[in-house]
Image (tube, grey):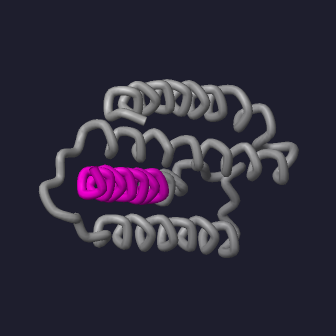
C-alpha cells in the first residue's frame, strides 16, 4: 500500500471515528445513563474507544517525528486515565453518585478524555515513525 493510499485511509478512519464519537456521546449515552447502567457503560466504552481512535488518526496524519519517539506521553495518558477513573469511582463510593452531583465528575471526566487523547496521539505518532523507518 502506498503512502498516499494509507493517508487517504487515515482520513476516512478519522472521519468515521469522529462521527461515531459524536453519535455515541450525543445519542446513546444520554439515552441509557440514568436507567440502564450496563448499557450506559457499554456505550461509554465504545465512545472512549472511538475517541482514542480519533487521536490515533490525528497522531498518524499530523505528526512528522524524525526519530522513534518515546512512549512517555502514552504512559502519562494511561496514568491520567486511571487516576481520573479511580477518582470518579471514589466519588461514587463516598456517596456522591453522578445522578445527584454531576458537577463533581467534571474534573475526572476531563482527566479521562485528556488521558485517552494522549494515549491515542502517542500511539499514532509512534506508528507513523515506525512506518517511516520501514519505508
39 displayed left or right of 134: right
Q: Nearer the viewer, residue 110 or 93?
A: 110
Residue 7, above or below 110: above
Percent from the top left, x then y, of residue 88?
A: 58, 65
Is 50 a magenta residue? no
Above or below: residue 109 compared with residue 77: above
At horizontal 41% and vertical 68% (from top left) the residue drawn is 80
Which stretch is magenta? 111-135
Query: Can you tell which quarter of the image residue 20 is in?
Result: top right
Please tell me which residue is depicted at 67% across the width and 53% down the height of the picture.
Answer: 98
| Residue 103 % position (x, y) | 53, 49
User: Which residue corresponds to the image point at 57% horizontal and 73% vertical from the top-left?
Assistant: 86
Q: Quadrant of the N terminus?
A: top left
Q: Nearer the viewer, residue 116 or 3?
A: 3
Residue 103 drawn above or below residue 22 = below
Examine the image and state in which quarter residue 24 appears.
top right
Residue 89, above or below 112 = below
**Which SS does the magenta portion mostly show?**
helix
Horizontally, residue 133 falls left or right of residue 56, namely left
Residue 131 vs residue 119, the one in the foreground: 131
128 lies left or right of 112: left
Residue drawn at x 73%, y 43% as measured from the top left: 43
Outermost residue toward the left in this view: 66
Tell whether position 129 is magenta. yes
Amino acid at each position: 500500500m502506498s503512502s498516499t493510499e494509507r493517508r487517504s485511509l487515515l482520513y476516512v478512519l478519522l472521519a468515521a471515528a469522529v462521527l461515531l464519537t459524536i453519535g455515541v456521546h450525543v445519542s446513546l449515552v444520554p439515552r441509557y445513563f440514568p436507567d440502564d447502567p450496563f448499557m450506559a457503560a457499554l456505550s461509554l466504552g465504545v465512545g472512549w474507544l472511538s475517541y482514542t481512535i480519533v487521536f490515533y488518526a490525528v497522531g498518524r496524519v499530523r505528526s512528522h517525528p524524525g526519530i522513534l519517539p518515546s512512549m512517555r506521553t502514552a504512559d502519562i495518558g494511561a496514568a491520567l486515565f486511571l487516576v481520573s477513573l479511580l477518582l470518579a469511582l471514589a466519588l461514587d463510593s463516598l456517596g456522591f453518585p453522578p445522578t445527584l452531583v454531576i458537577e463533581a465528575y467534571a474534573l475526572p471526566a476531563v482527566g479521562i478524555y485528556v488521558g485517552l487523547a494522549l494515549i491515542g496521539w502517542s500511539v499514532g505518532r509512534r506508528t507513523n515513525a515506525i512506518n517511516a523507518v520501514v519505508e
